[in-house]
Image (spheres, rainbow, N blue to C red):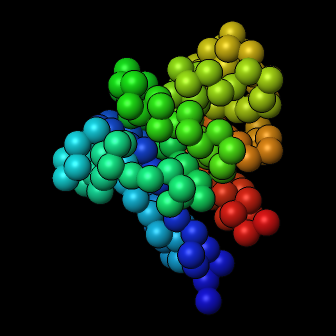
Amino acid sequence: MKRLDGKKIAIILDDDFEDSEFDVPYRKLKDEGADITIVGLKKGKELTGKNKKVRTRVDAEFDEVNLEDFDALVIPGGYSPDRLRAYPQAVDFVKRFKDKVIAAICHGPQILITADMVRGRTMTSWKTVAIDLKNAGANYIDKEVVVDGDMITSRQPSDLDAFVGAIIDKLIE
């Protein structure tokens, strides 16, 4: 039996995501037994990472999935979170995870800022998002992974091992 057997994870994604920040968690969480659904704006749409190294498809649209089916939400960085936060259905989907595990890396916290979910939280992110987190009321720490309750954040691709490790640890608690 794998550590994440029976766990269901949503990854929200749009074009120009940071290739490794999607691909590494996707592969490692799947290898641990997690059932992963890529949620986006249009079911079946092919998405391409900003470095053009990774391609994937949207499994389901935001309004097609039932929040109760998921144990966690993963938000890769790149331009994807900034694109998604322009769509109310994406922001509303994220908001509904407020009592579940949310893991965001790099620019991922941008959609959490739009969803007004960072105030009073201790978090990290890509360095240019730090000021946005502070202005939105978060306590920013420059560290490879920060776990604040059910919220997990990391800064950049070099933090992926710690990021994925924290997600696994939180889901098997």
Q: Which of the two residues, 116 or 145, is positioned nearer the viewer here? A: 116
In the displayed structure, would residue 50 be above or below residue 169?
above
Q: Is residue 152 visible?
A: no
Q: Which of the two residues, 147 or 55, is positioned nearer the viewer here? A: 147
In the displayed structure, would residue 153 be above or below residue 57?
above
Q: Is residue 123 visible?
A: yes
Query: Residue 143, image x and y in percent?
Result: 76, 38
Task: Locate the C terminus and report the quarter of the image it occupies.
Answer: bottom right
Query: Residue 47, image x and y in percent?
Result: 25, 46
Q: Is residue 22 left or right of residue 104?
A: left
Q: Is residue 12 left or right of residue 132?
A: left
In the displayed structure, would residue 85 be above or below residue 17?
above
- What residue do we see at 59% from left, 54% from top? 72
Question: Residue at the top extreme?
Answer: 135
- What residue do we see at 52% from left, 71% from top? 34
Q: Is residue 146 left or right of residue 94?
A: right
- What residue do we see at 33% from left, 49% from top? 64
Query: Residue 100, image x and y in percent?
Result: 66, 49
Task: Locate the N terminus and report the quarter of the image it occupies.
Answer: bottom right
Query: Residue 13, image x and y in percent?
Result: 38, 43
In the displayed structure, would residue 117 be above or below residue 136?
below
- What residue do we see at 40% from left, 59% from top? 37
Total of numbered circles in the picture? 0
